[in-house]
Image (tube, grey):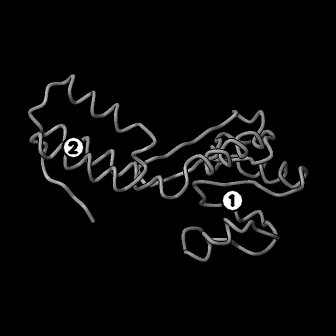
Amino acid sequence: PTVTNELKQRVEAGEIRWLNRSFEASDVRDVFLLVIATDDGDTNDSIARLANGVPLVNRADGGTGGNLQIPAQLSRGKLNLSVTTQGASPKLASRLREEWEKQFPPSYEEYVDFLYECRHMLKASPLSGTEKDHYLERMLDPSYLEQEKQWVMKDEIHNKGGGTICQD
C-alpha cells in the first residue's frame, strides 16, 4: 500500500492512523468512518459490500456503497474554503483547491485575523452602522494585506473609540 505525502504528514503528526498492510474484512468492525480509497475498483466494491454497518462511508472513486463525500478544502486560520462536485469530478474540486492555494497564500491567515480584530473593535465603537460598514468594506481592499496598512487602520478605529489594539 502507498499513501500520499499529505496523508503521510498527517500520520507522522499523529492526526490519523494508517495501517500499512492490505485490507482485512475485520477492518470495518467497530468503525465510525471508513474511507475506501484503493486504486482497484473491484477491491473498493468488495470493501463497500462489507461496510453496511459503518455509519459513514466515503468511497473516493465515486462508486456505489458510500454515503459521505469529503470536499476538497483549504484552511487559512479562520478562513475555511471547501468545494465538492457531488462526485461528478473530484479532480475539478482538487484543481479549484489548488487555485485557492495560489490565491490565498498562508499569509492570508494574518489578514483574516486582522479583519476579525477590526470587526470586534468596530462592534465596541460608538460609530453608526453606516460608518462601521464603511470601515468593513474599506478593509477588503487588497492593500490591507500589508501589515503596516493594517496597523494604521487599527489605530484609526481605536481613535474613533473602537476598543483596544493588538499589535504583535
Mark 2 vs 1: CB contact within 8 A: no
Count of labels in the image = 2
Q: Amino acid at mark 1?
A: Val
**Considering depth in this image, is 5 or 46 the residue closer to the camera?**
5
Disc 2 packing (10 Å; few <14; some 14–19; many ≥20): few
- Identify the mark at residue 36; answer none if there is no mark: none
Residue that label 2 marks: 120
Q: CA distance from mark 2 to mark 1?
A: 47 Å
Disc 1 element: helix
Determine the residue positioned at 25% across, 44% down. Answer: 118
Tell me the quarter of the image containing the C terminus: bottom left
**Considering depth in this image, is 109 or 152 the residue closer to the camera?**
152
**Considering depth in this image, is 69 or 93 the residue closer to the camera?**
93
Q: Amino acid at mark 2?
A: His
Left or right: where does residue 17 sit relative to residue 125? right
Marks 2 and 1, the one that precedes in the sequence = 1
- Judge whether 130 appears above or below 167 on screen: above
Left or right: where does residue 106 sit relative to residue 163? right
Determine the residue positioned at 65% across, 48% down. Answer: 53
Q: Residue furthest top?
A: 130
Determine the residue positioned at 34% across, 31% down. Answer: 137
Disc 1 packing (10 Å; few <14; some 14–19; many ≥20): some
